[in-house]
Amino acid sequence: MLRAVSEEGWATYCIDRNINYTNVCDVYCTFCAFYRPPGGHPESYVLTREQIREKLRGLYAAGGKQVLLQGGHHPDLRIGWYEDLFRWMKAEFPGLHLHALSPPEIHHISKLEDMPYEVVIARLREAGLDSIPGGGGEILVDRVRRRIARLKVDTGGWLAVMRAAHRLGVRSTATMMFGHVETPGERIEHLDRLRRLQDETGGFTAFICWTFQNDGSAVLRAPAAGSSEYLRMLAISRLYLDNFDNVQSSWVTQGRKVGELSLHYGANDMGSTMLEENVVSAAGTIHRMNEPDLHRMARAAGFEPRRRNFFYEII
């Protein structure tokens, strides 16, 4: 059964940090202002362990133990690099929840190593992977994906990674980035594919949607989708995804006031404090909130804030 927001009068959130371990990427998505191409671009980077250590120390100092680890499709980072990194992170920071590597990244590793998704995920889980973010979903319709992310994993591959993860007991989130070249019907196709997979596996913990962000630095050009369109899509998602318990607000892209409104348009969760964010901010959208800010946002909307972990267990 769908958990109605009004049943408890709560708006949940977590404290986490988004660490983008590299911006080197060879899929060249037309909507992305974050990536830098392989081959020694002066602005490319791969974070060192000392840099990651400092970021995680900041997370723990803020009272959080969950990290969202994502990056570009770096052609030189093999599965052993990720396994060593995960084991090191878990040894250095006991209790860390590692929410890492979206389906396109897992697909990328699978291609590099010529390994099935199940083997890649099982090895990463053994090294410390706890859950998988839903990034790279964009719109799960191949016509759209060929237009905006031609070299990224296709719709079937994205769903296959998630299906394999769920069957191995690794849970995940699901996402949608809309407001670019897709039609309204293709948005519903996206939701339907998520709903069908959730019926099959029950492995998704939450759904998050946001509008395409563009300050002119990306190749893709599209009229900006406004707040009313975002709220309408959020409400439709809550109704259509009746087998998802949780729907997150995207205050990171929409700002605090729309974040408040979203709690009356189907969202029951405010996401996280997101101590660091680089991908959306690279496209010119920068909204920041700390834990007291999230408390104020929830209460201004008439809800009581409750901190949670990844599995939506109240802390």
Image (cartoon, rainbow, N blue to C red):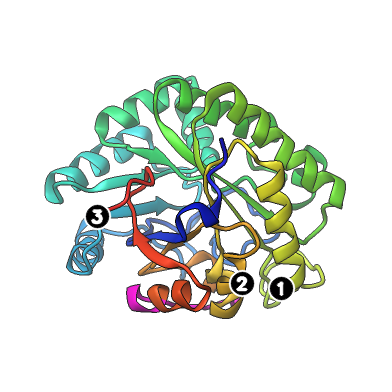
Give the answer, above or below, for where 152 lies relative to 46.
Answer: above
183 or 314: nearer the viewer: 314
Element class at badge 1: helix
Q: Is residue 232 magenta?
A: no
Q: Amino acid at mark 1?
A: Ser
- Locate residue 13, reporting x and y percent: 40, 60
Q: Residues within 10 Å of mark 1 (few under 14, many from 20)?
A: some
- Locate residue 266, reporting x and y percent: 62, 57
Q: Which residue is mark 2?
A: 261
Q: Amino acid at mark 3?
A: Lys
Residue 65 numbered tag: 3
- For the point 53% across and 42% down, the residue is 245
- Locate residue 267, reporting x and y percent: 57, 58
- For the point 59% across and 30% down, the residue is 198
Q: Which residues are magenta?
A: 284-293
Residue 227 numbered tag: 1
287 or 7: nearer the viewer: 7
The answer to whether residue 140 shows anywhere in this view is no
- Does the CB distance between marks 2 and 1 fall below 8 Å? yes
- For the point 41% across and 21% down, the residue is 168
Residue farthest along the front direction in this orientation:
7
- Locate residue 149, reporting x and y percent: 70, 48
Give the answer, above or below, for where 283 lies relative to 206.
Answer: below
